[in-house]
Amino acid sequence: MTQVDFPGDGYLGQVEQVQINNLEINQIIVAAKSVDLDGKGGIDWSDPQQIFIISVDGKTKTQLTEDKFFTRTWTVNNQTGMIVITGHYDSNENGKYDKKDKNEILIFDLKTLEMIKRI
């Protein structure tokens, strides 16, 4: 096993292992705050939460969502092997969610870790 590191002042949220044998998918999904986006000297409640995919042996860690994307919810479709992520971009960079921010739904393939669709 290999240790997977996140920033010392980061926050780990939901962690879930997804194993779909018929699609040959066995990954660990981690929701974490790992970026001090507002530059206030540390990661806190106002910073975005990203989605990471970690191999079960800990050797690879892939960040799916961009640093500036505020993940709200996510779910896995066990039939297709896709992860659906909802959230928003702080389009006007004012540090809060308002009408000018862009809501999006992101769909990624858990086998290839590539984005399939942005809605």
Image (cartoon, rainbow, N blue to C red):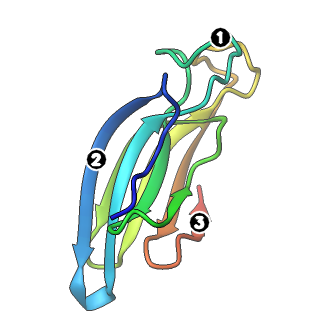
Among numbered discs 3 and 2, the one appearing first in the sequence? 2
Q: Which residue appears at 58% of the width and 71% of the height?
A: 114
Q: Disc 3 designates what residue?
A: 117
Is 16 or 91 nearer to us in this picture?
16
Quadrant in the picture for the C terminus: bottom right
- Labelled pair 3, 2 in contact (Cβ < 8 Å): no
Among numbered discs 3 and 1, the one appearing first in the sequence? 1
Is 97 or 53 nearer to us in this picture?
53
Q: Which residue appears at 51% of the width and 38% of the height?
A: 87
Q: Nearer the viewer, mark 1 or mark 2?
A: 1
**Kind of residue at badge 3:** Lys
Secondary structure, mark 2, is strand
Q: Residues within 10 Å of mark 2 (few under 14, many from 20)?
A: some
**Among the 4 quarters of the image, the one containing residue 84:** bottom left
Q: Disc 1 designates what residue?
A: 41
Q: Disc 2 designates what residue?
A: 15
Among numbered discs 1 and 2, the one appearing first in the sequence? 2
Q: Residue furthest top?
A: 40
Quadrant in the picture for the N terminus: bottom left
In the picture shown, does residue 73 fall above or below 117?
Answer: above
- Where residue 30 sits in the image (x, y, percent)? 37, 48
Secondary structure, mark 1, is loop
What whole-number distance in Å separates the C-alpha atoms at marks 3 and 1?
34 Å
Secondary structure, mark 3, is strand
- Where residue 101 sits in the image (x, y, percent)? 66, 27
Q: Which residue appears at 46% of the width and 66% of the height?
A: 59
Left or right of 51? Residue 67 is right
**Among the 4 quarters of the image, the one containing residue 89:** top right
